[in-house]
């Protein structure tokens, strides 16, 4: 069983930056597609970014292109989400997810972390 634990969330002012981390254990990290999703209260979980097994392919939601960067370190078994130019619309619980296949939807992923709260104030 794969366990994912997010960290790095918190309160940040609009225009600021934040880096999220997700540490993985219990599986073959280097074989997984990894993704970040986010969810606001009462709404469905939405895709943010994805990175393939070797880090060669990345993709981003239109709302975060040019501001967010996903990366992975297969030695540390950790993925990251660097978030720049944050706005109040980025406020959400951010989740990391893993699966053996590549996908853009929450239902495509088998393993999930517990989430970390990011709050952007104006």
Image (tube, rainbow, N blue to C red):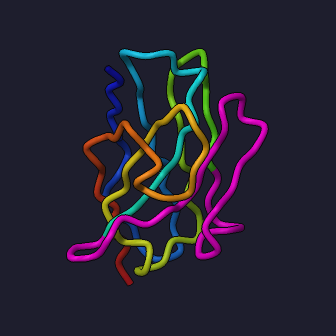
74 or 32, nearer to the observer: 32
Tell me which segment is drawn in magenta.
40-69
Relative horizontal placement of residue 68, taking residue 117 as reference (left or right) = right
* Spot occupied by residue 65 in the image (x, y as percentages of width and height): 68, 68
Residue at 22 percent across and 73 percent down: it is 41
Whether residue 3 sits left or right of residue 58 in the image: it is left
Question: Where residue 46 appears, x then y in whole percent?
Answer: 43, 66
For residue 40, above or below residue 1: below
- Give the residue at x 51% y 71%: 86
Q: Quadrant of the N terminus?
A: top left
In this rendering, the answer to whether 36 lies above or below 113 is below
Instruction: Residue lying at the far right in this picture: please name it.
Output: 56
Q: Nearer the viewer, residue 102 or 60?
A: 102
Q: Quadrant of residue 83?
A: bottom right
Q: Residue 43: within the magenta?
A: yes
Residue 111 quadrant: top left
Question: Going by the image, does 59 lie left or right of 117?
Answer: right
Q: How many marks?
A: 0
Q: Quadrant of the C terminus?
A: bottom left
* Residue 35 shown in magenta: no
For the stretch drawn in magenta, the main secondary structure is loop
Which residue is depicted at the point 34% across and 52% down? 9
- Residue 48, given in percent of the width and then of the height, sits at 53, 61
Above or below, comparing residue 3 to residue 51 in the picture: above
Check the image and name the residue furthest to the bottom. Answer: 122
Q: Residue at x 53, y 35 (%)?
A: 79
């Amino acid at each position: 069983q794969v366990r994912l634990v997010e960290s790095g969330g918190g309160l940040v002012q609009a225009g600021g930056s934040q880096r999220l981390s997700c540490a993985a254990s219990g599986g073959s990290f280097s074989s997984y597609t990894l993704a970040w999703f986010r969810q606001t209260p009462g709404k469905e979980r939405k895709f943010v970014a994805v990175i393939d097994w070797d880090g060669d392919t990345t993709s981003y939601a239109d709302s975060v292109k040019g501001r967010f960067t996903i990366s992975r370190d297969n030695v540390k078994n950790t993925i990251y989400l660097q978030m720049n130019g944050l706005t109040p619309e980025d406020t959400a619980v951010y989740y990391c997810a893993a699966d053996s296949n590549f996908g853009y939807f929450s239902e495509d992923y088998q393993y999930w972390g517990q989430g970390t709260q990011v709050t952007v104030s104006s």
